[in-house]
Image: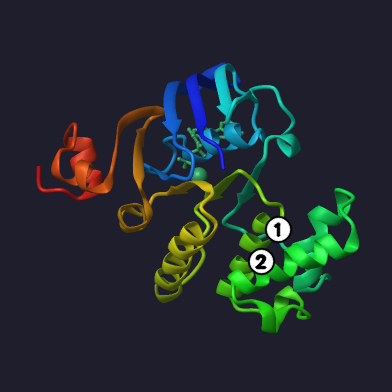
Amino acid sequence: MADVKLQDVRKNFSGLEVIHGVDLQVESGEFCVFVGPSGCGKSTLLRMIAGLEETSSGRISIGPRDVTHVDPAKRGVAMVFQSYALYPHMTVRDNMGFGLKMGGAPKDEVKRKVDEAARVLKLDAFMDRKPKALSGGQRQRVAIGRAIVRGPDVFLFDEPLSNLDAELRVEMRIELARLHRDIGATMIYVTHDQVEAMTLADKIVVLRSGRVEQVGGPMELYQDPANRFVAGFIGSPA
Ligand code: ADP
Ligand code: MG
């Protein structure tokens, strides 16, 4: 577990600034949700925290460490994407253990961690299957399992449920809440779905055109939105 701090973080793409000086603190163990319309910069912010995208300026720290220029693999984060990106020729077990194995972890440690993640995600019965023999929800669970196995301080989710049908989304939402309770890690979760944000978040960060519009708990934003944009987005009466 670790807190995540952003200080005046900016991002340009070929001279055009798309993230305009974001200051933000995500507490250790918190479930923090970034919401906002398509193109507002949610993925870019998340990718900068992951280190998949360089910051143009500003600072990012995870726990006590300034990670602004640290390699993604050494930040203690694991990211789960909307497209699961599983290896089609590998079994569920090998998909989940691959990262650890490549990192040089001993075989018995890989097995122990994979089994533990499988139990948490109720994947025990599917460990020898290939991804094509799984449902969409099961595949997404494998992708989450792969992140759990790495034991990160911080989980980063980029719209992980947006490819699933409505019923499965509700089911996975409940599982994600349970997962957060069980493992207690810091989670930063990107979505454009207000219901997901309202039900999952300890803290919601509302983004608009590369700026933070408001930060608060779900009820706080609902009852006391800073402006009409937040009210409209959260669906509150103001
Ligand atoms: P969101 O995830 O909220 O939909 P993004 O972070 O993907 O938004 O994008 C924020 C802005 O940055 C958009 O205007 C998008 O077009 C731009 N952008 C994102 N990635 C790139 C890139 N690799 N090159 C140029 N512009 C980009
Ligand atoms: Mg995005």
Where residue 178 sits in the image (x, y, percent)? 46, 65
Image x and y of residue 231, in percent: 18, 42
Question: Mark 2 is on which residue type?
Answer: Ala
Q: Looking at this view, is 9 or 175 the one in front? A: 175
* 193 sits to left or right of 141: left
Q: Quadrant of residue 128?
A: bottom right
Total of numbered circles in the picture? 2
Which residue is pictured at 54% across the width and 38% down the height? 46
Q: Residue at x 48, y 19 (%)?
A: 7
**Quarter of the image where one finds residue 213:** top left
N-term mark: 2 or 1: 2
Q: x, y percentage for residue 13? A: 58, 24
Identify residue for label 2: 117
Residue depicted at x 66% and y 33%: 51
To which residue does mark 1 refer? 149
Q: Residue 79, which numbered label?
A: none
Secondary-structure class at tag 2: helix
The disc labelled 1 sits on which kind of residue? Val
